[in-house]
Image: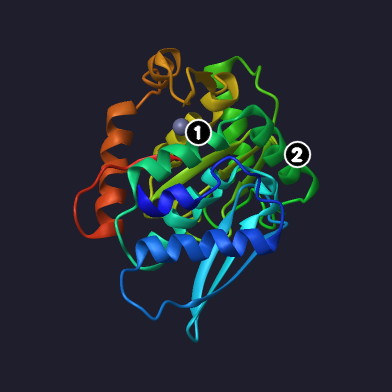
């Protein structure tokens, strides 16, 4: 334990000053060699639960979502260790991940995070009509074909930039579906775009559930209904191909970031 005993684990971190001390502690634990960099840490009004870390001219700059202001020191220490590990390309300590994740699943934190995303915006700057495909038209067809037209039309948008690893996202806070611009391309068959959109539409119909602390995005009902997609297995093969192309080697395709 040693250094950990010095931490006042449950004391809330209420100021930038204490946050800085937490990051100093994380650097001390993570970096064996001296001299260690200076730290500037502060709470920042991010949209949602974002945190960032950078090293510039020998100083570590850390910004932590102000939603976490007042969280127990243990949680912010865990987050600081995760961020420091990322910065120095070290393996992220599993215990810290567990502590931080558990805290973010706390209903009060989830609510604050969602409220901040609602009020602080997160602008959708692109439109549903792409160069090749029109998401509005595709949505109407799929809604008619698979949902008897019962789904409310969400905000539909292509992602601002191509993103190969994550092809679709359903944002239940804003009632929006974002599809990766990577798919707005003549080289991608229409049914592939339809499949990704269909998957995100299923998220509208099957909302995520929290079961003993874990969030279930794709439950059995979701998966069964997903298989009803007309060219399901062909679409899956395309998902794999897209994933291979993005990394140069085979890897598991991530279709959505629910
Ligand atoms: Zn999904």
Q: Position of residue 83 (x, y in %)?
A: 46, 59
How would you rate the neighbour count of disc 2 (Cα within 10 Å): few for under 14, some for 14-19, many for 20 or more? some
Q: How is the image coloured?
A: rainbow
User: In the structure shown, which secondary structural element does the residue marked by tag 1 occupy?
Assistant: helix
Q: Residue furthest left?
A: 249
Who is closer to the viewer here, 145 or 213? Answer: 213
- Residue 148 badge: none
Q: Residue furthest right?
A: 119
Q: Mark 1–mark 2 contact, CB under 8 Å?
A: no
- Residue 115 badge: 2
Mark 1 vs mark 2, foreground winner is: 1
Residue on which the image places disc 1: 102
Left or right side of 174 for 40: left
Left or right side of 7 for 143: right
Looking at the image, residue 232 lies above or below residue 119:
above
Who is closer to the viewer here, 64 or 19? Answer: 19
Who is closer to the viewer here, 160 or 99? Answer: 99
Left or right side of 31 for 185: right
Does the image show residue 163? no
Q: Residue at x 39, y 17 (%)?
A: 228
Q: Position of residue 200 (x, y in %)?
A: 52, 32
Looking at the image, residue 44 lies above or below residue 97:
below
**Where, by quadrant of the figure, is residue 111 drawn?**
top right
Who is closer to the viewer here, 79 or 159? Answer: 79
């Amino acid at each position: 334990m040693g250094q950990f005993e010095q931490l006042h684990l449950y004391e809330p971190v209420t100021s930038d000053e204490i946050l800085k001390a937490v990051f100093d502690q994380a650097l001390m634990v993570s970096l064996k060699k001296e001299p260690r960099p200076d730290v500037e840490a502060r709470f920042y009004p991010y949209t949602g639960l974002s945190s960032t870390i950078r090293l510039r001219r020998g100083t570590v700059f850390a910004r932590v979502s102000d939603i976490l202001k007042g969280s127990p020191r243990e949680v912010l220490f865990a987050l600081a260790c995760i961020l420091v590990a990322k910065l120095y390309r070290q393996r992220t300590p599993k215990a810290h991940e567990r502590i931080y994740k558990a805290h973010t699943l706390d209903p009060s934190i989830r609510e604050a995070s969602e409220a901040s995303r609602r009020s602080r915006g997160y602008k959708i700057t692109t439109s549903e009509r792409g160069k090749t495909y029109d998401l509005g038209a595709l949505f109407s067809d799929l809604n008619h074909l698979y949902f008897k037209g019962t789904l409310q039309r969400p905000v539909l948008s292509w992602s601002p930039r191509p993103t190969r690893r994550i092809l679709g996202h359903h944002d239940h806070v804003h009632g929006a579906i974002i599809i990766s611009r990577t798919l707005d391309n003549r080289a991608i068959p229409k049914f592939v775009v339809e499949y990704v959109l269909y998957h995100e539409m299923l998220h509208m119909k099957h909302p995520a559930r929290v079961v003993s602390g874990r969030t279930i995005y794709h439950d059995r009902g979701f998966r069964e209904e997903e298989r009803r997609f007309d060219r399901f297995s062909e679409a899956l093969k395309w998902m794999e191909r897209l994933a291979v192309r993005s990394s140069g080697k085979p890897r598991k395709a991530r279709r959505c970031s629910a």
